[in-house]
Image: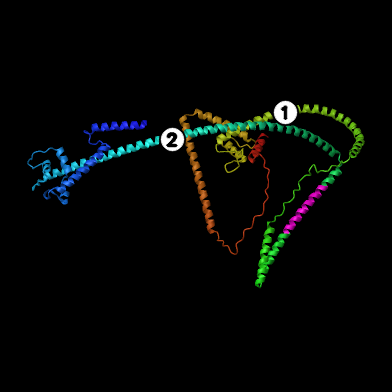
């Protein structure tokens, strides 16, 4: 309701504003009633003009051709009369207003300049009218669009209000449903808690009962183990033979079943082959029909037989159920007889036990003496082990330092110490020893086979430190220039070696190409050899040592240097 009142106030304010500016601005949009009133007046004016033209004398009437050739319409003459007041005639003759005031008088002679001026005035007037009409249409379209936009906005507001009301209603329903569901879930939770408590109580009772049964079972197992210990060995051998006979019977039964299935399949295949042979050798229609029927029956029987599968082999690894296992003792008198035999045999065992105790006491005395002597020897050996371990640790640390220093100096040299596989980039220890000896001789030392690799590396290091001291004393510019020249020579040597390697590879490729070209052409004759199936190969499990070849070789090399 408030939106409708506001719209009416806006329309009244707009109409007042348009009425105030109607006299000054020709582009204002008239109200709806003015537009309809203007249309009615225009229609009445055209009706009166048509009636006046019908009642006019013949002399005042005009033809269609004269109206089409007219330079201006009545409305244009009226507008020109209002815009430009009539003026007196000049040198060029009467003006357009004077000529429009008396249209019935046609001048015989008219100047071309006046005609062009009239045409120009008419064109300008028509252009202004077109501009006004276009502006009026544009304003009307804009007003229509604004009105449609307002209607759409009102409709969207109403739809939003309806959707909001529906959302509130749906939200209230969801809240009520959630409350009901929460109450149901709370009740179900309480029931579940009570059920859990009851089940926990039952589980505790069952666990206590199981513990009692387990204790009884443990006692029974102890008694069984005791009875088994005093049972004669011949009884266990008889039980093992009985179990073996049972397994043999099961295996024989399985083999007989498999043989029966295979025989049925062979009989079915023979019946099918016989039926096919009879059908092929049939001479009359009746024989052919009988043979065809027999062939179909044979095929059906063969399909049924082929569906039958051989039973799986019996499980021969089973054990006898303790409930079904037989016991040696069935009468208490048997147990008493065994006790009597044990008592008689224990007399001899008692005498032997006494003698054994005396011998054991002597052995214990000897053991104590030997233990004291061995403890002293062990202490001395432990002291030696500690000293040797210290020497080994020092040697290993020195070996690690030398190895790290060698890796830093060589750069690309890599000793495969981990899971790396010895390949094209790895260098063996023999090659490394040879390289160290070559560098040792190049540094100015005499070749001596008695000197180890570590000693040679130590001498090379000392020589290198002397040279570094000398280099530090030299001027920096001289050192830089010499480094650049050495680097240039090194790159040149590397480039020459690379070019020589490429040349050798090229010559080798050319040699192989010449050999292939000069080789005789081998033409295959006869039937091609058929590929044979590969025989079955069994997987071989190879137990690999955790240490790789490089580690073993390095340990052997270090052991050799230590010796």
Residue 560 is drawn in which quadrant?
top right
Question: Which image quadrant: the C terminus?
Answer: top right
Q: Earlier in the sequence, mark 2 or mark 1?
A: 2
Find disc 1 in the rendering and name its residue: 384
Position in image of residue 532 (x %, y %): 64, 58
Which-is-in-front pick, marks 2 and 1?
2
Can you name the residue that lies furthest to the left here? 91
The local secondary structure at tag 2 comes to helix
Q: Nearer the viewer, residue 487 or 194?
A: 194
Residue 433 versus residue 526: which sits nearer the camera?
526
Q: Which mark is residue 162?
A: 2
Q: Residues within 10 Å of mark 2 (few under 14, many from 20)?
A: few
- Give the secondary structure at mark 1: helix
The stretch of residues the image draws in magenta is 241-262
Q: Are marks 2 and 1 in contact (CB under 8 Å)?
A: no
For residue 518: magenta? no
């Amino acid at each position: 309701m408030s939106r409708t009142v506001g719209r009416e106030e806006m329309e009244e304010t707009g109409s007042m504003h348009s009425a105030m500016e109607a006299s000054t601005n020709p582009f204002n949009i008239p109200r709806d009633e003015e537009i309809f009133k203007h249309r009615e007046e225009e229609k009445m004016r055209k009706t009166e003009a048509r009636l006046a033209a019908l009642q006019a004398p013949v002399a005042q009437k005009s033809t269609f051709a004269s109206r089409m050739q007219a330079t201006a319409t009545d409305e244009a003459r009226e507008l020109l009369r209002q815009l430009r007041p009539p003026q007196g005639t000049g040198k060029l003759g009467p003006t357009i207003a004077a000529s429009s005031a008396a249209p019935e008088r046609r001048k015989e002679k008219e100047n071309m300049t006046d005609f062009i001026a009239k045409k120009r005035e008419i064109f300008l007037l028509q252009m202004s009218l077109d501009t006004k009409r276009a502006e009026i249409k544009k304003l009307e379209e804009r007003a229509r669009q604004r009105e449609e936009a307002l209607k759409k906005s009102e409709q969207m507001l109403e739809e939003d209000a309806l959707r909001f009301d529906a959302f509130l209603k749906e939200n209230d329903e969801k809240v009520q449903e959630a409350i009901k569901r929460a109450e149901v879930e709370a009740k179900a939770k309480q029931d579940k808690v009570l059920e859990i408590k009851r089940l926990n109580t039952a589980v505790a009772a069952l666990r206590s009962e199981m513990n009692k049964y387990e204790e009884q079972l443990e006692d029974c197992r102890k008694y069984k183990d005791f009875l088994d210990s005093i049972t004669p060995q011949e009884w266990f051998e008889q039980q093992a033979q009985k179990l073996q006979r049972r397994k043999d019977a099961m295996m024989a039964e399985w083999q007989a079943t498999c043989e029966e299935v295979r025989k049925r399949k062979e009989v079915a295949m023979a019946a099918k082959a016989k039926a096919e042979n009879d059908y092929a050798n049939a001479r009359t229609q009746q024989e052919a029909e009988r043979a065809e029927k027999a062939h179909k029956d044979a095929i059906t029987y063969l399909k049924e037989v082929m569906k039958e599968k051989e039973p799986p082999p019996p499980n021969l690894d089973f054990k006898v159920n303790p409930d079904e296992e037989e016991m040696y003792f069935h009468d208490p008198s048997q147990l008493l007889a065994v006790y009597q035999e044990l008592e008689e045999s224990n007399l001899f065992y008692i005498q032997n036990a006494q003698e054994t105790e005396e011998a054991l006491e002597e052995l214990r005395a000897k053991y104590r003496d030997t233990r004291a002597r061995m403890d002293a020897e062990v202490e001395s050996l432990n002291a030696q082990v500690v000293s040797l371990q210290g020497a080994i640790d020092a040697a290993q640390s020195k070996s690690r330092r030398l190895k790290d220093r060698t890796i830093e100096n060589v750069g690309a040299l890599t000793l495969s110490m981990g899971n790396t596989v010895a390949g094209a980039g790895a260098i063996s220890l023999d090659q490394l020893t040879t390289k160290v000896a070559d560098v040792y001789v190049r540094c100015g030392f005499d070749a001596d086979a008695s000197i180890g690799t570590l000693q040679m590396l130590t001498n090379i290091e000392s020589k290198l430190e002397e040279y570094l001291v000398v280099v530090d004393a030299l001027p920096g510019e001289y050192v830089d220039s010499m480094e650049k020249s050495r680097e240039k020579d090194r790159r040149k040597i590397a480039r020459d070696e690379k070019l020589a390697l490429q040349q050798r590879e090229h010559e080798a490729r050319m040699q192989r190409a010449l050999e292939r070209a000069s080789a005789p052409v081998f033409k295959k004759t006869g039937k091609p050899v058929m590929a044979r199936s590969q025989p079955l190969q069994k997987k071989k499990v190879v137990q690999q040592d955790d240490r790789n070849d490089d580690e073993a070789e390095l340990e052997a090399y270090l052991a050799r240097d230590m010796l």
